[in-house]
C-alpha cells in the first residue's frame, strides 16, 4: 500500500499527516456513543439506511391509505372488511364505511406521502447517500454534518404531516397539489392550525431537507471524485443523481416560496392566491382579495413538473448500471445517455404549463407548452433505445435486480406513451383529471420509479448490509408485484377514458359510470394483492439480514468503484487507495479473459472500430478477491 | 496500513467544499426569492392601483438608511476576511464587529419600520392591509430572517476570536461573506421593487388625493 502514496507531491504530505489523523479517528469510531453511531450519524451509509427505513415505513402507510380509497371506489358505502369498525371514528361512519371527508384526506395523503416521503427520499435520499461517495471512490460526502441534518428534517416532517389526525378537520384534503382556493380557504379565525397548515409546514421541511442534500451531492460530485476519475468516467447512476441534485437546487426553492405564500394565506389570511369576491363569502375577518389561484398552479408546477424528473432520473441511472452489468455489455451510447438525462432535466423546466391546459391559459401559450412537452419524448426515446441496444445480444443474467430493471424499462415505455396523450392539449382536454392520468402517473412512478428502486435495493443490498438478498423470495416479490401492478393500473386507462373522475368519493351515483363498476372491483382486488406482495420484500430484507448468504466483495462482477470496498464497509468506506483507470462499463473487452474490467484495476486498452481492445493488462496482485 | 489511505484528497475543483456548497446553496436561494419576485410581478400587473397606494405608505428614508447600512456591512465583511487572511486578528475583530453592528442596525431600523406599519393597521388581519403589504411583509420578512441567519454565525466567529485558541478559518469567513453579499444583493432588488417602483397612474392618482 505504501507505493500508493509515493507519487504524491511534497505539498500533499502535510495533508496526509492530517488524514492519517482522521483515520485514527475512524478507528476510534467504535468509541462513539451509540446515538452518534446509529441515530445522529454523519456516515453516509448510515444516513442512507435511515432514509430507507423511514421511507419504507411510509411506503406502507401510503399503501394502506391507497387500499382504503380503493375499497371505497369498488364497494362504495360498504364497511371496510375485517377492520372497518376498528378504524377511528373520524375515518368511518358508524357502519365502518369510509366517510366522505376522510376519502378526500386519503387521496391527498396517499399522494403526498408517496411523493414526498417515499419516492423522493428513496430515490434521492437513500441511493444518493449510499451510491455517491462509494461510486466516486471517496470516504464520505463533502459535508457530512449537513448530510445528517438533511435526513433529520424528514422524520419531524413525517410526524407533522401525520399529526393532522389530532387536528380539527383531520388531514389536509385539497389533493397533493393543494390548489387554492380549496387549500387557502379555511372557515376559521386566523392563527388556527388545520391539516392544510401542517401539510405546508411538513412539505417545506422536506423541501429544505432536499435542498441541503442536493447542495451536498453537487459539491461531492464536483469535488470528491477519486484520483483519475473524470466527469465522463462516472457511472450513469451518479450522472442521474448529480443532474437530479441540480434540479432540486433550482426547482425546490420555488415550491418553498409558493408554500410560504400559501401558508400566509392559510395562517394569516392574506390573499396571494384568493380572488376578491370569493373571500367576501367564505372568510372571517378582513377581506383582502385581488390574488390569483392560477398563480399557485404556475409556481407549484414550476417545481412539481421537474420533481417528476427528480423521481425518475436517479432510477434511470440505476437501471442503466443494472442492465449493463447483467447484460455483460458496455452501456450503449454512454455519452448520449448523459446528454439525454441533461436534456430531460432542462426540458423539465419549460413544460410545467401542460398541467394547466384546463386552468385557463392563452391558447398560444398552451401550444408552446404542448410542443416543449412532446419534445421530451426525444431524449426519453434515446434512453429507451440505448437500454434496448445494451441488452441486444447481451449475455443476460436474469437476477431479481435485472428483472426489476427490465420492468422499469417496459413500464416506463407505457407510462411515457400515455404521457404523450396528455401532452397533446386537445386530447388532454378530454382526459384531464380522469383516471387516465392516475394510470399514467402510476405507470411512471410505480412501474418506473418504484421498480427502479427495487432494482437498486436488490443490486446494492449486498454492499449495504454485507448479505445477499434471497433470490427466490426476490423473484416471488417481483412476479407478484409485476402482475398485480399491471392488473391494478392498466384498467385505469379504460376507466379514465370512460370518464371516471380522478377524485370522487362515490362513483355509483353517476349513471354513466355504471358500465365500469366491474373494472373498479377488479382494480381493487388487484391493488390488494399488489399491497400484500410487498410483504415479500419486507420479509426478504429482514430474513436476509440475519440468514442471508455472506456477500462477496463484488458479487455481480461489476466495474464500478463501490465494489472495490469491503462487503459491509465501515466508516471511511475503502481499505485500499482508489485510482480510476477507465470508464464504468468495460464489459466483455476483447482480448481479456474476464468479461469485466473494474475501474480501479490498472491496464491499458485502445479503441478500434468501436471495439475496446486490451493492450496492456496488468492483473493486480491484490488480496482483495475482486474476482 | 489504512492510515496511508488517500481517499479524502484535495478538492478536485480546488474550491473548498464549504465554499462550493455555498455557491450551490446561493443558486437555490436565488430561485427562492425568484418565486416571490415572479408572484410580485404577476400580481402587481393585475393590481396596479393597490400596489401604487401601498408603495406610498412605505418609508423610503428608512429603507435608504438600511441600504447604506447593508452595503457598508458588505464592505466591512470583505475587509474582515482580508485581515484574517493577512493574520491581522485585531482588525479582523474590528471589521467583523462592525459587520455584526450593521446587521443589528438593519434589524433595528426594520423594527421601527414594522412598528410604524403596525400602528397604521397594515399588518395581515389589520384593517388597512392590502395585497401589497402581504408582499411587503413576505419579502422583507424573509430577507430579515436571512440577515439574522447571517449575524448568528458572525457572532459565533467573533466571540471565538477572543478565546485562547482564537478563530483562524479565513475560508469559513469567506464562505459566510458570500452569503452576506447575497443577502445584501437581494435587498438591492427588494428595495426598488417595493419602495421605489410606483406605478405611473397610481402615483398620479395619489397626487390628486393629497
Image (cartoon, helix red, strand yellow):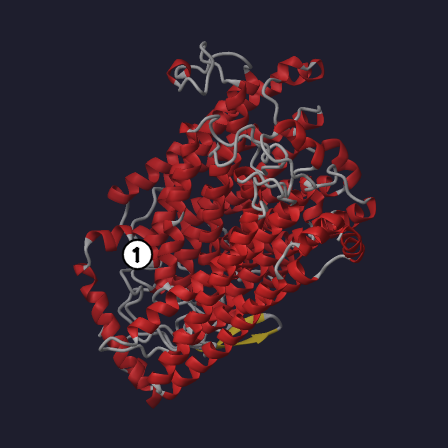
* Residue lying at the far bottom of the rendered structure: A10
* Residue A283 picture quarter: top right
Q: Which residue is mark 1?
A: A552
> Which quadrant: the C terminus of chain A?
bottom left
At horizontal 55% and vertical 43% (from top left) the residue drawn is: A264
**Side of A376 where A54 appears, left or right:** left
Measured as percent of width and height from the top left, residue A566 is found at 29, 61
A203 vs A477: above or below:
below
How far across and down, in percent of the image, does residue A466 sit?
29, 52
Residue A270: x and y, percent? 59, 41
Residue B49 lies, with reference to residue B62, above or below; the image says above
Residue lying furthest top in this view? A95
Q: Can residue A439 be seen at all in this image of the molecule?
A: yes
| Pick the front one: A338 or A248 | A248
Q: Quadrant of the N terminus of chain A?
A: bottom left
Residue shown at 40% from the left, 85% from the top: B83
Residue projecting furthest to the front: B210
Secondary element at image label 1: loop
**Residue at the image position 51 percent from the left and 27 percent from the top:** A527
Residue at image position (60%, 53%) is B136
- Determine whether A248 is above or below A453 in the image: below
Instruction: Name the quadrant containing residue A442.
Output: top right
Mark 1 neighbour density, 10 Å: few (under 14) some (14–19) many (20 or more): many
Residue A7 locus on image (x, y percent): 35, 86
Chain letter of mark 1 equals: A
Furthest-left residue in this view = A31
Can residue A555 be seen at all in this image of the molecule?
A: no
Amino acid at each position: 500500500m505504501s507505493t500508493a502514496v509515493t507519487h504524491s507531491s511534497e505539498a500533499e504530505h502535510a495533508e496526509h499527516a492530517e488524514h492519517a489523523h482522521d483515520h485514527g479517528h475512524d478507528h476510534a469510531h467504535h468509541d462513539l456513543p451509540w446515538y452518534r453511531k446509529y441515530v445522529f450519524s454523519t456516515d453516509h451509509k448510515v444516513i442512507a439506511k435511515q432514509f430507507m427505513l423511514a421511507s419504507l415505513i411510509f411506503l406502507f402507510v401510503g399503501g394502506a391509505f391507497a387500499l382504503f380509497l380503493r375499497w371505497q371506489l369498488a364497494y362504495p358505502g360498504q364497511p371496510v372488511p375485517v377492520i372497518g369498525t376498528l378504524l377511528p371514528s373520524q375515518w368511518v361512519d358508524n357502519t365502518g364505511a369510509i366517510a366522505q371527508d376522510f376519502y378526500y384526506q386519503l387521496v391527498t395523503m396517499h399522494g403526498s406521502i408517496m411523493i414526498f416521503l417515499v419516492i423522493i427520499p428513496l430515490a434521492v435520499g437513500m441511493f444518493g447517500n449510499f451510491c455517491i461517495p462509494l461510486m466516486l471512490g471517496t470516504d464520505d460526502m463533502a459535508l457530512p454534518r449537513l448530510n445528517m441534518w438533511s435526513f433529520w428534517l424528514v422524520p419531524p416532517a413525517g410526524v407533522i404531516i401525520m399529526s393532522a389526525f389530532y387536528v380539527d378537520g383531520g388531514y389536509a384534503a385539497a389533493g397533493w397539489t393543494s390548489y387554492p382556493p380549496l387549500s387557502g380557504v379555511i372557515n376559521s379565525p386566523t392563527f388556527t392550525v388545520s391539516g392544510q397548515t401542517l401539510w405546508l409546514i411538513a412539505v417545506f421541511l422536506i423541501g429544505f431537507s432536499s435542498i441541503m442534500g442536493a447542495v451536498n451531492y453537487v459539491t461531492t460530485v464536483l469535488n470528491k471524485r477519486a484520483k483519475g476519475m473524470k466527469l465522463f468516467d462516472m457511472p450513469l447512476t451518479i450522472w442521474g443523481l448529480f443532474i437530479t441534485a441540480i434540479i432540486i437546487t433550482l426547482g425546490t426553492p420555488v415550491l418553498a416560496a409558493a408554500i410560504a405564500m400559501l401558508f400566509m394565506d392559510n395562517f394569516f389570511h392574506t390573499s396571494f392566491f384568493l380572488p376578491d369576491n370569493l373571500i367576501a363569502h367564505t372568510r372571517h375577518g378582513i377581506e383582502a382579495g385581488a390574488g390569483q389561484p392560477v398563480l399557485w398552479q404556475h409556481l407549484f408546477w414550476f417545481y412539481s413538473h421537474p420533481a417528476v424528473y427528480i423521481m425518475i432520473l436517479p432510477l434511470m441511472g440505476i437501471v442503466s448500471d443494472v442492465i449493463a452489468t447483467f447484460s455483460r455489455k458496455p452501456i450503449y451510447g454512454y455519452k448520449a445517455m448523459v446528454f439525454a438525462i441533461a436534456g430531460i432535466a432542462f426540458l423539465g423546466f419549460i413544460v410545467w404549463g401542460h398541467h394547466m391546459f384546463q386552468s385557463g391559459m392563452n391558447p398560444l401559450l398552451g401550444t408552446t407548452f404542448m410542443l416543449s412537452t412532446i419534445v421530451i419524448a426525444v431524449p426519453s426515446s434515446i434512453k429507451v433505445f440505448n437500454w434496448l441496444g445494451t441488452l441486444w445480444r447481451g449475455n443476460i443474467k436474469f437476477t431479481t435486480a435485472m428483472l426489476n430493471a427490465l420492468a422499469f424499462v417496459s413500464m416506463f415505455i407505457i407510462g411515457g406513451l400515455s404521457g404523450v396523450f396528455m401532452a397533446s392539449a386537445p386530447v388532454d382536454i378530454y382526459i384531464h383529471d380522469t383516471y387516465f392520468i392516475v394510470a399514467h402517473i402510476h405507470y411512471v412512478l410505480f412501474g418506473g420509479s418504484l421498480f427502479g428502486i427495487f432494482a437498486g435495493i436488490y443490486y446494492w443490498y449486498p454492499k449495504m448490509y454485507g448479505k445477499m438478498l434471497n433470490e427466490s423470495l426476490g423473484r416471488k416479490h417481483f412476479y407478484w408485484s409485476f402482475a398485480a401492478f399491471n392488473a391494478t393500473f392498466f384498467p385505469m386507462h379504460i376507466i379514465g377514458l370512460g370518464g371516471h373522475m380522478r377524485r370522487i368519493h362515490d362513483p355509483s351515483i353517476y349513471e354513466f359510470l355504471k358500465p365500469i363498476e366491474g373494472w373498479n372491483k377488479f382494480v381493487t382486488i388487484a391493488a390488494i394483492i399488489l399491497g400484500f406482495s410487498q410483504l415479500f420484500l419486507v420479509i426478504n430484507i429482514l430474513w436476509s439480514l440475519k440468514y442471508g448468504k455472506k456477500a462477496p466483495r463484488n458479487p455481480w462482477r461489476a466495474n464500478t468503484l463501490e465494489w472495490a470496498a469491503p462487503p459491509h464497509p465501515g466508516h471511511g468506506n475503502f481499505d485500499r487507495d482508489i485510482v480510476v483507470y477507465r470508464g464504468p462499463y468495460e464489459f466483455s473487452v476483447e482480448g481479456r479473459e474476464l468479461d469485466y474490467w473494474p475501474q480501479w484495476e490498472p491496464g491499458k486498452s485502445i479503441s478500434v472500430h468501436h471495439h475496446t481492445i486490451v493492450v496492456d493488462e496488468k492483473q493486480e496482485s491484490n488480496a482483495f478477491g475482486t474476482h | 496500513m489504512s492510515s496511508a489511505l488517500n481517499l479524502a484528497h484535495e478538492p478536485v475543483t480546488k474550491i473548498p467544499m464549504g465554499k462550493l456548497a455555498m455557491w450551490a446553496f446561493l443558486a437555490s436561494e436565488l430561485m427562492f426569492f425568484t418565486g416571490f419576485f415572479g408572484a410580485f410581478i404577476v400580481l402587481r400587473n393585475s393590481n396596479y392601483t393597490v400596489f401604487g397606494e401601498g408603495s406610498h405608505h412605505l418609508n423610503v428614508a428608512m429603507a435608504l438608511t438600511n441600504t447604506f447600512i447593508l452595503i457598508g456591512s458588505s464592505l466591512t465583511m470583505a475587509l474582515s476576511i482580508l485581515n484574517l487572511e493577512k493574520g491581522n486578528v485585531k482588525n479582523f475583530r474590528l471589521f467583523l464587529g462592525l459587520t455584526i453592528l450593521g446587521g443589528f442596525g438593519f434589524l433595528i431600523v426594520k423594527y421601527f419600520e414594522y412598528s410604524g406599519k403596525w400602528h397604521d393597521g397594515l399588518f395581515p388581519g389589520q384593517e388597512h392591509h392590502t395585497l401589497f403589504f402581504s408582499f411587503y411583509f413576505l419579502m422583507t420578512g424573509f430577507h430579515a430572517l436571512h440577515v439574522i441567519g447571517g449575524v448568528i454565525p458572525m457572532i459565533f466567529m467573533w466571540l471565538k476570536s477572543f478565546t485562547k485558541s482564537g478563530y483562524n478559518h479565513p475560508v469559513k469567513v469567506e464562505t459566510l461573506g458570500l452569503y452576506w453579499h447575497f443577502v445584501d444583493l437581494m435587498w438591492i432588488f427588494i428595495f426598488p421593487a417595493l419602495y421605489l417602483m410606483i406605478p405611473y397612474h397610481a402615483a398620479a392618482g395619489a397626487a390628486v388625493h393629497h
